[in-house]
Amino acid sequence: MKKRFVVALDSSTPEQQLAFQNYVKSTGAGWWHWLDSLWLLIDTRGQLDAIKIRDKLCEIFPRINNFVIELRPDDDTWAGYGPKTEVKNMFTWLKSDWIK
Amino acid sequence: MYTLALGLTMPSFRLVQAFLDQATAQGSRSTILRPLGWLITICAAAVLGSVELKAPDWVVTLFSISAGLGIALYLTAFIYCLVTKKEDLLRSETYSIQKLAIEKGFVGDSLAGVFRAEEAIHSERSLGAASQSTAEDDK
């Protein structure tokens, strides 16, 4: 099943971009990266999921906030890495307002 | 008879197809010398094979000449690239992309390939949208 993902990053270096591109190519997924720190991926084999991509991003872009959303016709799903304290929590809005 | 022949050739065909799929899975072009390298390898194998199988002299001579021409062409291409400062042709596309990406950062996609981020900033731009009706903004 074909899967589509939007991947957003806080920042990235050319070396990290290259490492991520190599990872995407190794999975056989198509990619679009015309905006800095934003990637669109299309996985025709249906092997990837938001959590797998998020974990890979944490490996390639250590300590860099990221956000991965899988676009589904019926129900989107997402995964991310970023601040999650009582005061500063990047996931609160996503859980309460983005997907109701 | 035809069915039998087809049955025998199908697995081989699938094997070749699988090999080719694997070979192109990386999605990058090799150097310009790679095809010549293959030509030389095949001709050299053919020479050895024909000698081993005691083929007629003209067959051995034919393969030897082909191998010799392949080697000459390989060296000529190599020297031409060095003399004309086209060393990039001797490097694989993967190397060139990695060099480009490490130097400047890149933009692109899996269809169009990779471009320098700077080039994208300075190139001509226009609006784009999934459908014509949404090609303009809502001002």
Image (cartoon, coloured by chain):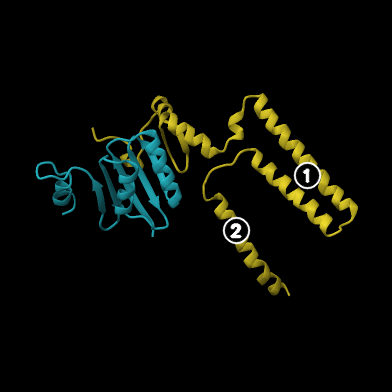
Q: Is residue B8 left or right of residue B134?
A: right
Chain of the residue that carries numbered disc 2 in the rendered image: B
Chain A display color: cyan
Q: Mark 1 falls on what kind of element?
A: helix
Earlier sequence position, callout 2 versus callout 1: 2
Circle 1 marks a residue in which chain?
Answer: B
Chain letter tied to yellow: B
Q: Is residue B57 left or right of residue B12?
A: right
Tell me the quadrant of the picture where the C terminus of chain A can be found. bottom left
Marks 2 and 1 on same chain: yes
Residue at image mark 1: B67
Q: Position of residue B51 (x, y in %)?
A: 84, 55
Amino acid found under the numbered disc labelled 1:
Ala
Q: Amino acid at mark 2?
A: Gln
Label 2 environment density (alpha carbons within 10 Å; few <14, some 14–19, many ≥20): few
Relative to A50, residue B11 above or below: below
- Camera sees residue A71: no
Instruction: Give how far across and how far down residue B123 sits, in percent.
Output: 42, 26
Q: Which mark is residue B9?
A: none
Residue name at image x 61 percent, y 62 percent: B15
Secondary structure of the residue carrying numbered label 2 = helix
Q: CA distance from mark 2 to mark 1?
A: 26 Å
Q: Position of residue B50 (x, y in %)?
A: 82, 55
B4 shown above or below A63: below
Select label 2 or label 1 by which is in front.
1
Q: Image quadrant of residue B67?
A: top right
Q: Quadrant of residue A18?
A: top left
Q: Which residue is mark 2?
A: B17
Total labels: the figure holds 2
- Position of B54 with respect to A4 (left or right) is right
